[in-house]
């Protein structure tokens, strides 16, 4: 059974049944593939797991953004493998470890136990998903992959409102690790890097966390606004996310273009701005998440009858990002973002913000078009995009004999 | 957005004030240009700082003078080639060159352009996109110092001079000037509290000088830096309520 956002919202309105369930019972087992929200982490590790094998990788629509795991890490690596054989070995190792980590294993299995006991002597899966993607730099002349690149994969450009920091940008390979608890994410990263140390040094990494619904509906970002309300769900999401264009290299079918944007939020300044101004910047009511011409979060804004921006300013964030016209329908993206907290900035401010992550069939047709509309938006005074990159999520691992990137490298 | 009585006049006062500062800026930019024309880089660095501090005192915070303001004070962020991008121009471009061993000949055309760009700001000062809209004055009260926190004390806009504290000090001058215009419209106790919090910020900045000189924040001892950050944060929390008090809704 797949619950789409609308069903989920109705459930939430009817008494937040799903939230109460998973929040109240530690160790609740969520049926594989079901997108029930387990939004409130319990104290005990959970035994959730998501199918590892399939045509597409997990961690994008499985679980879907509305039910995503509470903890995440994005770790970007540079590949030092000497040749394509070593690169293939590296990807096979990542596959083997990810399969163990995501599926759970018999502790007596040959390549087990794990080298650390962060998760204890047992090995709870904790809802872990591993999502492996590659940057355009992998398709240079090192591994004979020039000419094999997905058609639209480039180095993420510098956008007009960016404050780029080279220490937080790009990479040959990115691991997205998501789990119900932060220790499982940490453990997975440690387990994989222990076995790949010589071939892929870490370039940058950042941990994220998901907020539970407050008090209901779509979780809020660190600016206090519900974020992700308009995300596509179900079949519509699938049709926007998975690469199926015959013009793409055959190996890339079933993959997805991934955009990661590390966006600092100037939360101190934000908290010194009036609510009405904040609402006009976003285009939603802060408390309810309703569009400015609506009354509840699920209401669809009707921009066609508001051409001059009487209700929703023409430069409000949600109006620029998704104008809801026929021409922009296939430009929509699937967002699966997390909050981050890093430490203190030089000026003593909290270093906190948003790990914006989105998936799409065609980064030019989708994210880049949205981003062009957002250039210069008033909200930019309160945020600073500084890192991330463009990556391509490899197709799924089909079975026990398959491995990440097999079709690309064989 | 309706404003309380008196804001229109306060904004007229602000335009007169910033027009005067712009005249000083034009003089200092002319001097900077002459330094470069005579390959006197040492004087150019001194006159650059004077010009940069003039600009801070204008109070054009948060890019509130639009594209014309960005031409004078823009950063390389958002440009594909960063500091090497041909679209990176203005005061910070000159700062980058003067503190990265670039030649006077390289920088002279940039100074020529700056002379013209500053003149354009002066010409268009009363346009709604610059200082003409009184609503922007209500934001300027707190955004000048928000700008100091976001761009100066964070290190983001330091292209080599390490002038964050000097710039912040000039931002205090601009904020005091604006407070002098809108303060009479508001509760005298609030204005007095704000003034005393700004006095503490000024004291913290003065105490941060070593041998009469400010270092960049990153080179300043943590306790000294913290006192400045704390004082600035405190006054910003107070200034944050001014925009609403100046609106009538």
Image (tube, coloured by chain):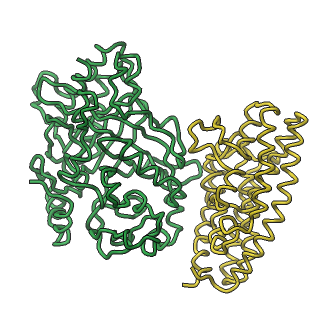
**Residue at 22% over, 22% down:** A92
Q: Colour of chain A?
A: green
Please indicate, yes or no, whether residue A122 appears anywhere in the rendered image: no
Determine the image quadrant of residue B2.
bottom right
Q: Position of residue B227 (x, y in %)?
A: 65, 56
Q: Is residue A229 visible?
A: yes
Chain with colour yellow in the figure: B
Residue B160, position as x, y percentages in the image: 70, 39
| Picture coordinates of residue B199, whole percent (x, y) | 73, 66
Q: Residue at x 23, y 58 (%)?
A: A40
Would residue A228 appear left or right of B2 to someone viewing this image? left
Q: Quadrant of the N terminus of chain A?
A: bottom left
User: A199 left or right of A277?
Assistant: left
Does B6 appear above or below B176?
below
Q: Name the residue furthest bottom.
A: B5
Query: Which of B189 and A57 lies nearest the eye of the viewer?
Result: A57
Q: Residue at x 19, y 64 (%)?
A: A6
In the foreground, A397 or B117 = B117
- Looking at the image, which residue is at 77% across and 48% down? B114
Does A288 appear above or below A327?
below
Figure quadrant of residue A258? top left
Left of B5 or right of it: where is A265?
left
Residue A277 as seen in the image, left or right of residue A319: right
Number of numbered discs overlaid on the protein picture: 0
Q: Is residue A213 above or below residue A187?
A: below
Out of A313 and B242, give the one closest to the viewer.
Answer: A313
């Amino acid at each position: 059974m797949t619950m789409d956002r609308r069903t989920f919202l109705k459930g939430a309105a009817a008494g937040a049944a799903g939230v109460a369930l998973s929040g109240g019972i530690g160790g609740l087992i969520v049926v594989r593939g079901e997108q029930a929200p387990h939004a409130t982490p319990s104290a005990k590790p959970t035994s959730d797991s998501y199918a590892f094998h399939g045509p597409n990788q997990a961690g994008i629509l499985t679980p879907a953004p509305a039910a995503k795991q509470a903890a995440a890490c994005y770790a970007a690596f540079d590949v030092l493998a000497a040749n394509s054989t070593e690169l293939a070995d590296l990807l096979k190792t990542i596959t083997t470890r990810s399969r163990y980590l995501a599926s759970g294993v018999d502790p007596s299995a040959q390549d087990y136990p794990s080298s650390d006991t962060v998760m204890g002597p047992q090995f709870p899966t904790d809802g872990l998903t591993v999502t492996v993607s590659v940057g355009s730099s992998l398709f240079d002349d090192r591994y004979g992959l020039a000419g094999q690149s997905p058609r639209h994969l480039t180095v993420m450009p510098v956008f007009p409102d960016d404050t780029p920091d080279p220490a937080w940008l790009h990479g040959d390979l990115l691991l997205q690790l998501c789990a119900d608890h932060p220790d499982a994410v940490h453990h997975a990263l440690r387990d994989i890097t222990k076995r790949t140390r010589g071939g892929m040094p870490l370039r940058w990494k950042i941990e994220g966390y998901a907020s539970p619904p407050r008090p209901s509906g779509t979780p809020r970002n660190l600016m206090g606004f519900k974020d992700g309300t308009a995300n596509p769900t179900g079949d519509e999401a699938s049709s926007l996310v998975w690469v199926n264009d015959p013009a793409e290299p055959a190996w890339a079918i079933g993959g997805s273009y991934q955009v990661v944007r590390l966006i600092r939020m100037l939360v101190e300044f934000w908290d010194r701005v009036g609510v009405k101004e904040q609402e006009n910047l976003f285009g939603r009511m802060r408390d309810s998440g309703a569009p400015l011409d609506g009354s509840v979060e699920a209401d669809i804004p009707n921009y066609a009858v508001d051409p001059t921006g009487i209700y929703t300013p023409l430069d409000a964030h949600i109006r620029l990002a998704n104008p809801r016209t026929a021409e922009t329908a296939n430009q929509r993206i699937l967002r699966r973002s997390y909050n981050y907290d890093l430490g203190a900035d030089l000026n003593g401010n909290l270093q906190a913000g948003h790990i914006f992550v989105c998936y799409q069939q065609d980064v030019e047709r989708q994210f880049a078009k949205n981003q062009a509309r957002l250039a210069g938006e008033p909200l930019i005074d309160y945020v600073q995009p500084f890192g991330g990159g463009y990556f391509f999520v490899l197709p799924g691992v089909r079975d026990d004999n398959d491995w990440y990137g097999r079709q690309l490298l064989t | 957005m309706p404003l309380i009585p008196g804001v229109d006049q306060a904004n007229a006062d602000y335009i007169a004030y910033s027009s005067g500062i712009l005249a000083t800026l034009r003089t200092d930019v002319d001097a900077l240009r002459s330094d470069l024309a005579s390959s006197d880089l040492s004087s150019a660095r001194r006159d650059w700082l004077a010009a940069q501090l003039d600009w801070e005192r204008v109070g054009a915070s948060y890019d509130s003078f639009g594209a014309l303001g960005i031409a004078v004070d823009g950063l390389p962020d958002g440009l594909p080639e960063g500091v090497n991008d041909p679209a990176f121009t203005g005061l910070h471009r000159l700062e980058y060159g003067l503190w990265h061993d670039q030649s006077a000949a390289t920088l002279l055309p940039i100074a020529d352009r700056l002379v013209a760009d500053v003149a354009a700001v002066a010409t268009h000062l009363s346009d709604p996109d610059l200082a003409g809209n009184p609503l922007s004055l209500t934001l300027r009260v707190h955004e000048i110092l928000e700008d100091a926190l976001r761009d100066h004390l964070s290190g983001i806009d330091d292209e080599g001079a390490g002038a964050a504290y000097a710039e912040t000090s000039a931002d205090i001058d601009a904020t005091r000037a604006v407070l002098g215009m809108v303060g009479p419209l508001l509760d005298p106790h609030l204005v007095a509290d704000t003034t005393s919090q700004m006095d503490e910020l000024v004291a913290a900045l003065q105490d941060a000088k070593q041998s009469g000189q400010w270092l960049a924040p990153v080179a300043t001892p943590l306790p000294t830096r913290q006192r400045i950050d704390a004082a600035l944060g405190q006054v910003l929390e107070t200034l944050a309520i001014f925009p609403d008090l100046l609106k009538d809704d």
